[in-house]
Amino acid sequence: MLSYGDVQDCMKWIWLKNGKETGYAEFYSAFSVVTNDVLLKVSADRQYAAWINGRLVCCGQYTDVPEHKAVDSVSLTAFVHRGENTLRIVAYHADADFSVARTMEAGVAFEVYDGERLVASSGEKTFCREAEGYTVSDIITPQLGYGWGYDFCRTGGEWLFGEVVKNVFCEEPRPVPPCAVGEPVSAIVCAQGVYRYGGGKTAAEKAQSAWLSSRSFAEMTGKDRLRFAALPEPVRFAGDGGDGVYVLVDLLRETAGHLSLSVNVPCAVRAILVWGEHLSDLRVRSFVGERNFAVPLQLRAGENVLDDYLHRLGGRYLCLFAEGVEVTVARLSLRESLYPFKMVPKYFNDGLLGAIYAAGVRTLQLCAHEHYEDCPWREQALYGMDSRNQMLYGYGAFQEFRLPRASLRLMAYSVQEDGLVALCAPAREAVCIPSFSVWWMLALCENAEAAYDAAFVREMLPYAERMLESFRIRTDRNGVNAFTEPRFWNFHEWSDGLSGGQTFRTEECASYADGPLTALLQRAVTKLAALERREGRNAQAQGMEMYAAELAAALEHYYEQESGLYATFLRGEEREGHHVFMQAAMVLTGSVPAERVFRLAGELKHAKRCVPCTPAAFQMKYEAIMSADGDKRFCLDEICNVFGKMLFSGATSYWETEHGEADFGDAGSLCHGWAAVACWFLDRYGE
């Protein structure tokens, strides 16, 4: 079969004429083949799904940048037949930047090869139109961007020729395999009733404020709940006394995937589809802090079927609000979409540890798609610290190295003019967290330690060197000074005193020397110097070794003889704060005298005088404890206490913090990649 490299010319990129704003477009092409050796090349500026002869072939554009535009190459052997075939592509374009992606020139490009013969390609004669059904809706979150809706009464309009757009893309093969999309997951109706809207502007607000009146399953359906709640056949829900009928399903565990819906109504009505992770409000929480986890639907009389492959939802529960007195539900579920990790069997003598490890693996699976994500529900964004943790945890759990390198490269592509990684890659964010560039450097070194790839290391080292310069210029005798300009958020983790203060500022903050940043950087520079040595770049290695020594000397200024602890910050000569995060970071520098290390071990474990750390920093804490006094029993006991408590609370994935959904103003994530630390600990240190 023709390989990607055999095609030398760039594809033609097309879009709707006069259709550059946010929206959905549909493309159609017919082609004939004479062999079974057929290949599709396809790419979109933001998102796409492609069908051959009405069957889904592929979906999920790799999140990228224009200078490295990912093109999918998909075998069509199982989808085509000799003679005429049809290709249909639906694509989505956003005209604004959000955390998950940056806006680009609107466009779709494709080519179909029969052997080495080009039989179809995007161009001036490709038919296109506004995609039927899809509408643009309220922003879901600042990270995820625009929401969407679906109008089953809306047709796609007249097919017209598309417009060839300026090709600003440099095309490359997709760096990681696509996610595997499965059948709709099992779902059980767990609540039903009638509702009356209470108010609100967005679909999510209306669902959140609706007055709900519960009805029994048998009362609404005339069927036995035990036999029919799993929807083995279409079930009619009927009830009066409100604005409409609601049906809530439990997907039985946290998941991430594409909406799969099949409902029937006697007449055209409006509806709202809500998704979420819990029922703490005695409903699916759809609106929280201006975030909208709901989409508006316009149902037509009769059957309404939608399998949406352009958006990915995360959560455990779905709820359909349908106006009118009845709705028949045949399917209300998600088609799970996950990165194809290799599952490495693990066995434990302790049943609780086995369950904790399995839930950690599940958490890591749900937080990885085109790249690593902090959480599948609220943000789906690639952050420097979050992804470093997920990479490290996954080396043992999956023996996976391709996704880590692709994500590190994507973050490198997002390095800004000041040399620092953007808040989220590949977005162009107004805010930057300086410490996340240090975590990127540590992740690069840990990737090399796990499975050395010389070509990748050589490719990435120049980015690391550039980042280091951004910190060198802010270094003095007290270490690295905080980034005071308004665009910088001096975040380390969510414990009190380390959250970096106000995220969005218009003025400079007061200057201070940042102990955690200095300690993290000292460790990263030491590791980078070793990489430079291994690659024979001795001059660069020597410069880094000297800088690491400077940082180690500066960290001595943070030590308090009286308390035996390291202060967190320095303001002039005044020391401020004590955090477990700082003590752990210091132990891991390798520069702390042995007699101090033993004393720090007790504080790491019991935090009698320090602010404890959150799950985001558990890995660093546990590694420091094992380095300091090797107290594995303490670490295992805490893992069982913290994460076992989540499991006994009914969790199927691990929470962003121990406070669960109630944290962050009721927006806490119940699936967060950085919380799967038990996988790393058990893989590295055993039971």
Image: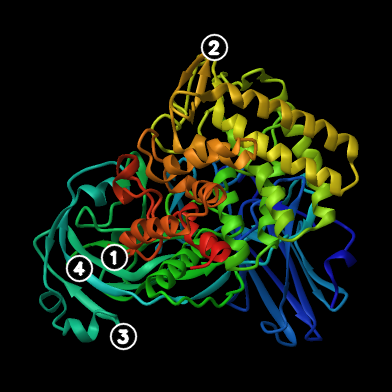
Q: Secondary structure under badge 1?
A: helix
Alpha-carbon distance for marks 2 and 4?
Answer: 60 Å
Q: Secondary structure under badge 4?
A: strand
Three-letter code, disc 1: Phe
| Relative vertical location of residue 252 with respect to residue 391 in this rendering, above or below | below
- For the residues labelled 2 and 3, say whether their Cβ atoms are less than 8 Å apart: no
* Residue of label 1: 648
Q: Earlier in the sequence, mark 1 or mark 3?
A: 3
Alpha-carbon distance for marks 1 and 4?
Answer: 23 Å
| Relative vertical location of residue 487 with respect to residue 628 in this rendering, above or below | above
Q: Is residue 421 visible?
A: no
Q: Secondary structure under badge 3?
A: loop
Residue appearing at x 66%, y 56% in the figure = 404
Q: Is residue 301 left or right of residue 70?
A: left
Please identify, in this view, whether the residue under mark 1 or under mark 3 is nearer the observer.
1
Figure colour scheme = rainbow
- Image coordinates of residue 394 in percent, x first then y, are 59, 62
Q: Secondary structure under badge 2?
A: loop
Alpha-carbon distance for marks 2 and 3?
Answer: 69 Å
Where is residue 525, by image quadrant? Answer: top right
- For the residues labelled 2 and 4, say whether their Cβ atoms are less than 8 Å apart: no
Three-letter code, disc 2: Gly
* Residue of label 4: 191
Residue 572 numbered tag: 2
* Residue of label 3: 232
- For the residues labelled 4 and 3, say whether their Cβ atoms are less than 8 Å apart: no
- Image coordinates of residue 320 in percent, x first then y, are 29, 63
Q: Earlier in the sequence, mark 1 or mark 2?
A: 2
- For the residues labelled 1 and 4, say whether their Cβ atoms are less than 8 Å apart: no
Where is residue 653, by image quadrant? Answer: bottom left
